[in-house]
Image (spheres, helix red, strand yellow):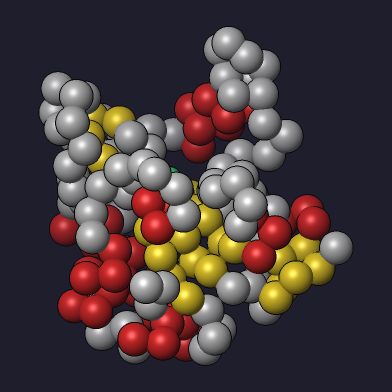
Amino acid sequence: MRTPIKYLIIHCTATAAGREVSGSDIRRWHLLPKPEGRGWKQVGYTDLFHLNGGIERLVENNEDAYVDGWEITNGAAGANSYSRHIVYVGGLTADGEKPQDTRTIEQRKALKKYILDFVRTFPDVQCAGHNQFSNKACPCFDVPKWLKEIGINQKNIKR
Ligand SMILES: [Zn+2]
């Protein structure tokens, strides 16, 4: 199975502001059988953006214009076979109660660079937030508005 990439979908880890999350945390949350984890076959995201702007690769990817079966991540049911999912650490207020845009300056910088590069490499891709695919707060900021602010063309922004 091999499908051209259609979407780059942004997520948050839905964790409290300032709290670091590791790749192995995410692997545990997603892969452990229920009830400890979600019991998925693969984690939800390809790349994890840490609080300091560092990017951790969670799932191998050959960076071509297709989503191969072994590259699929489970970020948004129904769209996974043609999407790349990325996630920043955070998304909730410090008390962990409410959705909030908690992206650090370093995360914003790293996300911006990643997305600009991605769109340059895959000119037909559309970038989106998880909440454009399902009724969720994730990634807890207005993705189309921010994409416009960082200079992404309208045609690369999912409406
Ligand atoms: Zn999400």
Question: What is the x, y in percent for residue 108?
Answer: 24, 62
Task: State the image quarter where residue 155 is shown.
Answer: bottom left
Q: Which quadrant, please, contains the N terminus?
A: bottom right
Question: What is the x, y in percent for residue 8?
Answer: 49, 66
Is residue 29 positioned above or below 76 on the image?
Answer: above
Number of numbered discs overlaid on the protein picture: 0
Task: State the image quarter where residue 90 is shown.
Answer: top left
Q: Nearer the viewer, residue 119 or 141?
A: 141
Left or right of 41: which side holds 26? left
Question: What is the x, y in percent for residue 131?
Answer: 37, 51
Q: Can residue 106 be seen in this view?
A: no
The residue sitting at 67% across, 16% down in the picture is 33
Left or right of 155: which side holds 27? right
Q: Which quadrant, please, contains the C terminus?
A: bottom left
Question: What is the x, y in percent for residue 58?
Answer: 58, 46
Q: In which quarter of the image is ligand 1?
A: top left
Q: Nearer the viewer, residue 65 or 55?
A: 65
Left or right of 114: which side holds 3? right
Q: Can residue 45 be seen in this view?
A: yes
Is residue 136 positioned above or below 148 on the image?
Answer: above
Q: Nearer the viewer, residue 131 or 116?
A: 131
Left or right of 159: which side holds 41? right
Name, please, the residue furthest toward the front: 135
The residue sitting at 23% across, 54% down in the picture is 141
The residue sitting at 19% across, 24% down in the picture is 97
The residue sitting at 68% across, 39% down in the picture is 42
Is residue 141 positioned above or below 26 on the image?
Answer: below
Task: State the image quarter where residue 38 is shown.
Answer: top right
